[in-house]
Image: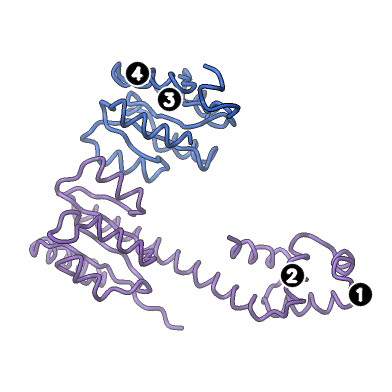
Amino acid sequence: MKDIPQTVFVVDDDDAVRNSLRMLLKSAGVHAEASASAQEFLSTYEVSQPGCLVLDVRMPGMSGLEMQHELNLRGATIPVIFITGHGDIPMAVEAMQHGAFDFLQKPFRDQELLDRVQRALVRDAEYRARLRHTDRIRERLASLSPREREVLDLVTQGKANKMVAGDLGVSQRTVEIHRAHVMQKMEAGSLAELVRMMMAVSP
Amino acid sequence: MNADNNGGNKRVRTIIVAGQSSERTREVLRALSGFTNVIWPTSLESALAQTGSKDAGCLVIADDLREEPIDEFLQEARELQRNLPIFVITDPDDVAEAVSAMRHGATAVIEIPPSYSALCEEVSRALQ
């Protein structure tokens, strides 16, 4: 599957700020899209779109904090960098408690914003890579037969084939065959790798 | 202070205060000792040691620690107790520090001078 390129979404009602941020990001080689309101952004944004969001706190209509709440309800994980000219501690704390990646007060230096955007993009890419990895593991798990799944659960608990055979009431040879199938279907090179896979998808 | 003050046989949870704070902050924190233990370790190391104890209910980082490496301290405290509520008391103008504290594991940041009700509400919620 081809990766979708990352986009920095800028949401700010101030035309001058919005355009200068878009130009700044473009000059740094970052693909950026700008919206003048929370409603405009939310009407087109899909949570599967990778990137990060630079979001003004105070906007007419839906505020930045309200938009963050709406994104959380939609299950969006996009890192949000808040920008504001009138920030205070309660506002910053609320934004961070609700999962903001950062909170930046205007005026800020261009490089300051670019550094934060880069960090946010790295975090988003890492998160989505982890998500793809766990999705692949879940797909492999779904391909196991019920008996193979039982064998997998017991061997990843550290039980030897003989014990697994005793627990399941089957021969040790049968366990060995199921175990070989599990390793093949899960694409695991070792028991340690299998355990790591199970840990990655455990709640 | 006995266990009954905290609800029957429930274990008394301790508020650990790192730093000495301004007089106003100290007053508010002292008032909290009416319903739970409040301890004032003499050093950050000692505060960290107390943070790791099973009775720790929450950690309050007082406002006289601004010159200290708070972020590092916060991270260490967070590593010791992943779910421990940690409150940082700081200058009202220092939004950047508040954001940094939140990034490094603070549960909330409270402005100086902290109101008794605000701090009491946060701490009560933390100890529940």
Cα distance in 3D space between marks 4 and 1? 70 Å
Question: In this rendering, do the residues under marks 3 and 2 share a single chain?
Answer: no
Q: Position of residue A26 (x, y in %)?
A: 20, 70
Q: Mark 3 packing: few (<14 Cα in 10 Å), some, or many (20+)?
A: many
Badge 4 amino acid = Arg
Question: In this rendering, do the residues under marks 1 and 3 share a single chain?
Answer: no
* Residue wearing tag 4: B26
Vertical arrangement, residue A102 with respect to residue A143, above or below: above
* Residue wearing tag 2: A152
Q: Where is residue A53 in the image (x, y as percent from the top left)?
A: 28, 63
Give the foreground label among 1 and 3. Answer: 1
Q: Which chain carries label 2?
A: A
Vertical arrangement, residue A95 with respect to residue A130, above or below: above
Cα distance in 3D space between marks 2 and 1? 16 Å
Badge 3 amino acid = Ala
Q: Which of marks 3 and 4 is nearer the N terminus?
A: 3
Badge 2 amino acid = Leu
Verify CB contact (< 8 Å) between mark 1 and mark 3. Answer: no
Q: Nearer the viewer, residue B121 or B81?
A: B121
